[in-house]
Image (cartoon, coloured by chain):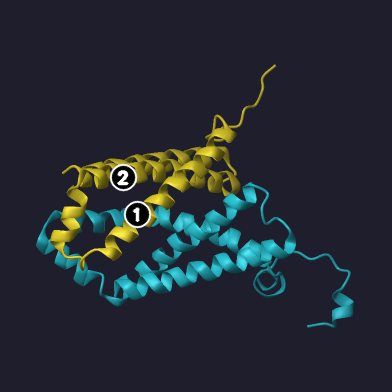
Amino acid sequence: MSSVAAKKNRPKYLNLQALLFEIRLPLPGWVSILHRISGALLFLAMVWLLWMLDRSLSSEAAFETIRQYARLWPVKLALLVLIWAYCHHLCAGIRHLFLDLDKGTELASARLTAALSIGAGLALTAWLGAKLW
Amino acid sequence: MSVHRVVTGSRNGLTDWLAQRVTAAIMAVYTVIVLIVLLGGPPISYAVWKDLFTQGWMRVATLLFAASLCWHMWVGVRNILMDYAKPEGLRLALQVMTLLTIAAYLGWTLHILWR
């Protein structure tokens, strides 16, 4: 790695190292991209969730099977990720509604509500996870 | 003279924008109600679970949720496709697949609710 001064004025192009370590997305940017990722994830996972809902309502035996299935750790992990996706999407969405009304668009408050959205999403996930298992 | 028109998947952006927010509000309210019912009630057994989904209000509320979700998903996924799927043919193909998937989800939900 050459010295910082030598690199200073050179045009930057996107390589993997730059994307991963050098370009830092501000907190509201994280809320935004996670909002999109969580939404896409929920859309794709809907087929699995509907399958579980379908099975769980079809008979008592199937209900118990699904209950056991949800206790397997890979399933539990996947469900926790989806619960997080739902909670984050909800919190980021509520924040977005306020931004639509021109509330919280100042830098300081935008950063604060971004941190709150991420925190609330994680806290809700932890709470629901604890309630479920 | 021919005009090149781009297929975006939307006829009115403002309607989509508004629909995304109204459907979001409906789903948020449903989420709170279902959480209160589930966490406030007895431990969830098959009987409790089945009984909940046999009640008329729950079926209608869930249908409303599902319809909102479908519309919401369409606007959201379409936005993602408009941002990342640049070749028109690819985007159109993915949009059609998205619509078919959403229609299948809705049909399945109806089947589950009124079996």
Q: Quadrant of residue A31?
A: bottom right
Q: Which mark is residue B61?
A: 2
Q: Which mark is residue B11?
A: none
Please state if A76 lies on the left or on the right of A17 as rendered: left
Identify which amino acid the numbered label 2 is placed on: Ala
Identify which amino acid the numbered label 1 is placed on: Ile
Residue at x 42%, y 45% (from the top left corner): B26
The residue lying furthest to the front in this view is: B40
Q: Nearer the viewer, residue B73 or A119?
A: A119
Classify mark 1: helix, strand or loop: helix
Q: Nearer the viewer, residue B2 or A116?
A: A116
Image depth: mark 2 or mark 1 in front: 1
Asked if A75 appears above or below B76 in the picture, the reply is below
Q: Colour of chain A?
A: cyan
Do the numbered discs 2 and 1 sit on residues whose CB atoms are within 8 Å? yes
Residue at x 34%, y 39% (from the top left corner): B103
Check chain identity for marks 2 and 1: say if they share one.
yes
Classify mark 2: helix, strand or loop: helix
Q: Nearer the viewer, residue B104 or B88?
A: B104
How far across and down, in percent of the image, does residue B31 sit?
38, 55
Q: Chain of mark 2?
A: B
Residue A48 in sight from this viewpoint: no
Q: Which residue is mark 1?
A: B33
Where does the N terminus of chain B fall, quadrant-wise?
top right
- Mark 1 closeness class: few <14, some 14–19, many ≥20 residues within 10 Å: few
Q: Alpha carbon of mark 2 to alpha carbon of mark 1: how far?
A: 10 Å
How far across and down, in percent of the image, does residue B82 sit?
57, 43
* Letter of the chain in yellow: B
Q: Chain of mark 1?
A: B
